[in-house]
Image (spheres, helix red, strand yellow):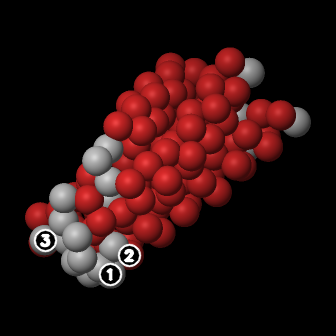
Amino acid sequence: MILFISSILFSILIAIVILFQAALAVGIPWGEYAMGGKYPGKLPVPMRVACLIQIVILAFLAVIVLSQAGSILPGWSGFANVAIWFVVAFSVLSTILNLITRSVWERRIWAPVAVLMLITSLIVAIG
C-alpha cells in the first residue's frame, strides 16, 4: 500500500510540475519561479521549447514510478527495476538544484516539491 500511495503522490507532484512547465511554455510570465529566476517574466522561445522537452521527460519519469509500483505497464517491470534509480538520481539532482538556486521563490516553492518527489521515488525504488 505504501508503494501505491508513494507512486500516486509522486505522480501528483510531477503533474503539478508538468502543468507549471506547460504554463511557462505557452508564455505565462512566471520565469522568476524557474531556471534560477534568470528570465523574469515570459521565458524566451528557446527556454519555452526546453519546457516542452522537460514535460516529456517528467511524464516518462511518472510512468517509470507508476510501473515500478505495479500500477501500470506490468510488462515494464524489468526496465522499471533499473530505471527507477535514474528517477531517484534525477530527484536528488532536482532537490540540490532547487535548494541552491539564487531564486528565492524557486527555493520556497520547488525545493519542497523536489524533496517530496525524492522521498516518494526512493520509497518506490526500495519497496
Can you name the residue that lies furthest to the right here? 1
Q: Mark 1 belongs to which amino acid?
A: Ile
> Between 28 and 70, which is closer to the camera in this rendering?
28
Residue at the image position 79 percent from the left and 43 percent from the top: 5
In this picture, residue 74 sits left or right of residue 25? right
Quadrant for the N terminus, please.
Answer: top right
Quadrant for the C terminus, please.
Answer: top right
Residue 55 in sight in this render: no
Q: Where does label 2 land, which residue? A: 23
Marks 2 and 1, how far apart in space? 5 Å
Residue at the image position 38 percent from the left and 71 percent from the top: 22
Q: Mark 3 belongs to which amino acid?
A: Pro
Q: Where does label 3 land, which residue? A: 44
**Contact check, label 2 and label 1, Cβ < 8 Å:** yes
**Contact check, label 1 and label 3, Cβ < 8 Å:** no
Rendering coords of residue 2 (x, y %): 83, 34
Residue at the image position 50 percent from the left and 57 percent from the top: 109
Q: Where does label 1 land, which residue? A: 28
Q: Mark 2 belongs to which amino acid?
A: Ala
